[in-house]
């Protein structure tokens, strides 16, 4: 397909007026920490390297309404959106989306098709800015994409990979640490500790080198359909809409991107992926998805406490026996450690705070002994898919496909998913290339080959082998039985059984009523090892414009309060790792409290969309370029 008119040269500063939340709770602005250099883009205006100012947004084609009156009646939808035609459009610039884009352009270049257009839209202001993971990665997929990814002779090699040198697995009580034999799935020989934020930036640079059109700062907010019901592409959201829903004088209409194939690579619980799964009934033959919330900090520790390449995992304290999850500590780079906790979101007690549990974990001697005397330089949180094999939906549909964690390919017992995300992106790319080069340009594309090759791939085999380990914790045997059964699966059975255990409940459906649950009080942060939540949010670089529609959509805040507060007593405030939700005392309200959403603090973790008991919070994309700007996560 020949390139369309160069709309990308029509650039503007999308969010120069953005500022950190001036929270009534006293939130600090993003800290002035060192940041990696800004990721380059293919447009006429350079990106700003300053954390508080998102990068340049291109494709602006709507005439600014500088003379508009705030009182005039104006329907934004009356303005026709500009559109661009590409061969493949990819929504999401994580490892899956970038791997798919790179593989497509590799195939096009190998076949001399320089006009084959692959366009990638990323809602973050920079590629990698919304990425967060542990992360110890299995290099099998990146080696296939770039065999020389670590080769000293390759000037574009990835420089920030730390080989894993040892594995330690511990069961924690409040003050003790009991060594356990690491399960075979947690053997990290040949794997690498990385900042997935850095790794994704590197993939973005490689994507541009092979000719992918990479556009950060573009938030895809709508799926477009053809008359026959197949996916036609996506549209980005309108800019310059006030909090009251009315256009401001800076209004700009979003843009449509039409493609013969559209890949959804939004990561866990993507806003458009949810819509596509529902429209095409992609879960008709699979179970619902289950999730965990991962909370992470990066610390610079004292040199004498640094053990480069050491990988530590723990289970037990601080989580109660009826809650699945565990902690990690990875030594990487130069005197850096990644520390974090994953909490399964099917936890029962509404008084639990995953953030509070993470802070408690850091006070355990196993972790505190490493952190003392060090400095926390980064924080973040993100949900991850835990459903595994049982929860894989159909991945292909008319006009597109789901790739990576949009479909849910995390291997929970391995504590890994990046290699599977990349591999599924590459499989989908190869299927799309075959379909587009062999089929008619007029007909809708269905990637049958992607479904077939996925089932024959290492991804399918790997997830099938461990399929019973996570749901074993939901059986009548309880957590202790789950540990014992998982051990039997890990060391002996290895998935070679005729049964497949089912997920017994949804995450939101597992939550008990507050009055029937023991209340949990969390220790006051000491400011050295543990921190209050707003201090942590200040380390994320998060920014949202204040005068824009709230992207955490609750139709009726008062109705939400009436339905949720009596039974759960402020669950939202506790499950959110960024202080977005709160109930404020208000005598004018029937229950004496008023529900409030501090959307400017949102770090895009998606927990609220998953854990809200009545499923009445919808996470939608804000303006492109907004949200966290993670560093070393």
Image: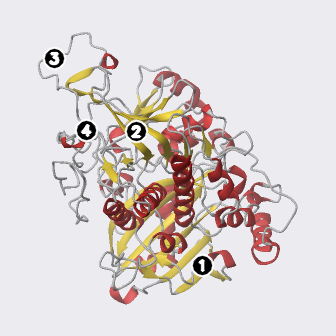
Q: Earlier in the sequence, mark 2 or mark 3?
A: 3
Instruction: Write down the residue under mark 2.
Output: 220
Q: In the image as oriented, which residue stretches furthest toward the bottom?
A: 304
Circle 4 sits on which residue? 5
Q: Nearer the viewer, residue 203 or 435?
A: 435
* Mark closest to the chain's N terminus, 1 or 3: 3
Under tag 3, what secondary structure?
Answer: loop
Q: Is residue 594 above or below residue 167?
A: above
Is residue 363 something that shows in the picture? no
| Number of residues whose C-alpha sits closer than 10 Å to that of mark 1, classed few (under 14), some (14–19) or many (20 or more) | few
Q: State if disc 3 and disc 2 touch (CB < 8 Å).
A: no
Which quarter of the picture shows residue 597? top left
Q: Position of residue 213 (x, y in %)?
A: 33, 51
Q: CA distance from mark 1 to mark 3?
A: 66 Å
Instruction: Choose the circle earlier in sequence order: 4 or 3.
Output: 4
Residue 30 position within the rendered picture, expressed as x and y whole percent measured from the top left:
25, 54
Looking at the rendering, in which quadrant would you find the C terminus? bottom left
Residue 304 coordinates in the image, percent (x, y)? 36, 90
């Amino acid at each position: 397909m020949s390139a369309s008119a160069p709309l990308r040269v029509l650039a503007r500063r999308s969010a120069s007026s953005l500022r950190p939340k001036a929270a009534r709770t006293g939130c600090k602005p993003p800290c002035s920490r060192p940041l990696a250099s800004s990721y380059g883009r293919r447009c006429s205006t350079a990106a700003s390297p300053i954390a508080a100012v998102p990068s340049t947004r291109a494709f602006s084609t709507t005439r600014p309404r500088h003379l508009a009156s705030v009182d005039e009646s104006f329907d934004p939808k009356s303005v026709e959106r500009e559109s661009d035609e590409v061969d493949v459009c990819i929504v999401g610039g994580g490892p899956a989306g970038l791997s798919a884009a790179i593989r497509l352009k590799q195939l096009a270049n190998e076949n001399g098709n320089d006009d084959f257009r692959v366009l990638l839209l990323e809602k973050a202001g920079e590629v990698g800015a919304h990425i967060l993971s542990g992360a110890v990665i299995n290099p099998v997929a990146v080696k296939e994409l770039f065999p020389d990814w670590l080769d000293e002779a390759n000037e574009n090699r990835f420089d920030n990979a730390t080989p894993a040198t040892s594995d330690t697995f511990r069961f924690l009580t409040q003050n003790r640490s009991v060594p356990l034999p690491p399960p075979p799935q947690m053997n990290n020989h040949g794997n690498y500790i990385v900042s997935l934020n850095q790794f994704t930036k590197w993939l973005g640079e490689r994507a541009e080198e092979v000719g992918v059109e990479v556009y950060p700062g573009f938030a895809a907010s709508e799926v477009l359909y053809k008359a026959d019901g197949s996916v036609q592409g996506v549209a980005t959201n309108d800019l310059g809409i006030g909090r009251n829903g009315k256009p401001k004088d800076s209004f700009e209409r979003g843009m449509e991107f039409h493609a013969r194939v559209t890949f959804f690579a939004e990561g866990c619980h993507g806003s458009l992926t949810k819509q596509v799964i529902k429209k095409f009934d992609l879960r008709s033959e699979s179970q619902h998805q289950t999730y965990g919330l991962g909370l992470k900090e990066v610390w610079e520790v004292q040199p004498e406490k640094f053990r480069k390449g050491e990988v530590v995992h723990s289970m037990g304290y601080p989580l109660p026996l009826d809650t699945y999850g565990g902690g990690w500590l990875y030594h990487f780079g130069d005197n850096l450690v990644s520390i974090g906790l994953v909490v399964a979101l099917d936890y029962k007690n509404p008084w639990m705070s995953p953030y509070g549990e993470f802070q408690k974990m850091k006070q355990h001697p196993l972790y505190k002994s490493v952190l003392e005397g060090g400095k926390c330089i980064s924080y973040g949180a993100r949900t991850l898919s835990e459903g595994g094999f049982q929860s894989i939906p159909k991945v292909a549909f008319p006009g597109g496909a789901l790739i990576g964690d949009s479909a849910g390919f995390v291997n929970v017992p391995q504590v890994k998913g990046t290699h599977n995300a990349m591999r599924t992106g590459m499989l989908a790319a190869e299927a799309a290339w075959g379909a587009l080069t062999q089929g008619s340009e007029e007909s809708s594309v269905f990637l049958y080959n992607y479904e077939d090759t996925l089932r024959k791939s290492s991804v399918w085999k790997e997830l099938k082998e461990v399929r019973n380990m996570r749901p074993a914790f939901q059986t009548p045997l309880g957590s202790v039985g789950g540990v014992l059964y998982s051990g039997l699966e890990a060391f002996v059975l290895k998935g070679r059984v005729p049964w497949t255990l089912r997920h017994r409940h949804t995450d939101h459906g597992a939550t008990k009523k507050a009055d029937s649950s023991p209340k949990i009080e969390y220790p006051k942060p000491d400011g050295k090892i543990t921190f209050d939540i707003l201090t942590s949010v200040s380390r994320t670089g998060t920014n949202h414009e204040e005068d824009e529609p709230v992207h955490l959509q609750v139709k009726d805040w008062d109705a939400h309060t009436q339905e949720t507060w009596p039974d759960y007593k402020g669950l939202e405030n506790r499950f959110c790792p960024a202080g977005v939700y709160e109930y404020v005392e208000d005598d004018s309200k029937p229950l004496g409290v008023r529900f409030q959403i501090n959307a400017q603090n949102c770090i895009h973790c998606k927990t609220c969309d998953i854990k809200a008991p009545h499923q009445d919070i919808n996470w939608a994309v804000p303006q492109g370029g907004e949200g966290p700007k993670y560093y070393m996560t």
